[in-house]
Amino acid sequence: DIQMTQSPSSLSASVGDRVTITCRASQGIRNDLGWYQEKPGKAPKRLIYAASSLQSGVPSRFSGSGSGTEFTLTISSLQPEDFATYYCLQHNSYPRTFGQGTKVEIK
Amino acid sequence: QVQLVQSGAEVKKPGASVKVSCKASGYTFPTYGISWVRQAPGQGLEWMGWISTYNGNTHYAQKLQGRVTMTTDTSTSTVSMELTSLRSDDTAVYYCARDPLSGWPFDYWGQGTLVTVSS
């Protein structure tokens, strides 16, 4: 199974801050990775697919990069509605595996 | 528009079984498989398994092998997930999501179904 190691597990940031979240795969997964935002009581929402492609309708302050084993989600200027939990997901092979999640909290 | 609509909340006793359905609309059903994901209270997202809506092939998470069964009904564009021998740690919100054989998965999700296992 491919393990996805996500860091940090939580972070505190202020509105306007630049935020970076990282996922490392235990083996190469090309660009078979997505990033998801989860808010309490709602289904997860896809932000990024193919590691760096922005989902339609998602603000351009979200961006993804990486390929192979190292991936990054960046929020260029954190907005109040961005306080949530973020997950990476690899779909290179079965079983699909999620990162452990990063909770972004208000400083 | 694409929609995945799941069945309602369930309360079950330990040892019982639960079946959650996911009805798809707004796209050609056999062109996208469906994955099931669950989230226990205060925990992260856990992938449970995948089913091809084209031919019924499945992949299940190792830890659920023997307890989970996923089925598809093309006549009603519905996928179902049955989990047996329920335990308290199966209490979670269960989601279905589109997951094609090739391409970029988890673009659309169901609204979630809360399954509570309690004596």
Image: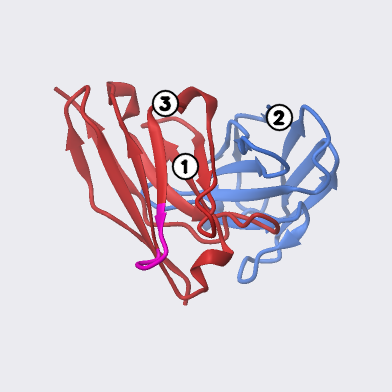
Residue pointed to by mark 1: B37
Q: In this picture, which residue range is highlighted in magenta? A: B72-77
- Give the residue type at disc 3: Gly
Nearer to us in this view, A49 or B52: B52
Q: Do the residues under discs 3 and 2 have CB atoms within 8 angstroms?
A: no
* Left or right relative to A64: residue A6: left
Find the distance from the CA under tag 1 to the CA under tag 3: 17 Å
Q: Residues within 10 Å of mark 2 (few under 14, many from 20)?
A: some
B9 shown above or below A27: below
Please report, as a chain letter, where disc 3 is located: B
At mark 2, the secondary structure is loop
Which label belongs to residue A2? 2
Nearer to us in this view, A50 or A57: A50
A13 shown above or below A27: below
**Picture coordinates of residue B95, whole percent (x, y):** 41, 48
Q: Which of marks 1 and 3 is nearer the N terminus?
A: 1
Nearer to us in this view, A35 or B66: B66
Find the distance from the CA under tag 1 to the CA under tag 2: 17 Å
Residue pointed to by mark 3: B66
- Give the residue type at disc 2: Ile
Query: Residues at marks 1 and 3, common chain?
Result: yes
Please report, as a chain letter, where disc 1 is located: B
Please report, as a chain letter, where disc 2 is located: A
The residue shown at (61%, 71%) is: A57
Q: Do the residues under discs 1 and 2 have CB atoms within 8 angstroms?
A: no
Which label belongs to residue B92? none
What tint does the image give chain B?
A: red
Q: In which quarter of the image is the C terminus of chain B?
A: top left
Query: Residues at marks 1 and 2, common chain?
Result: no
Residue at the farthest left position: B119
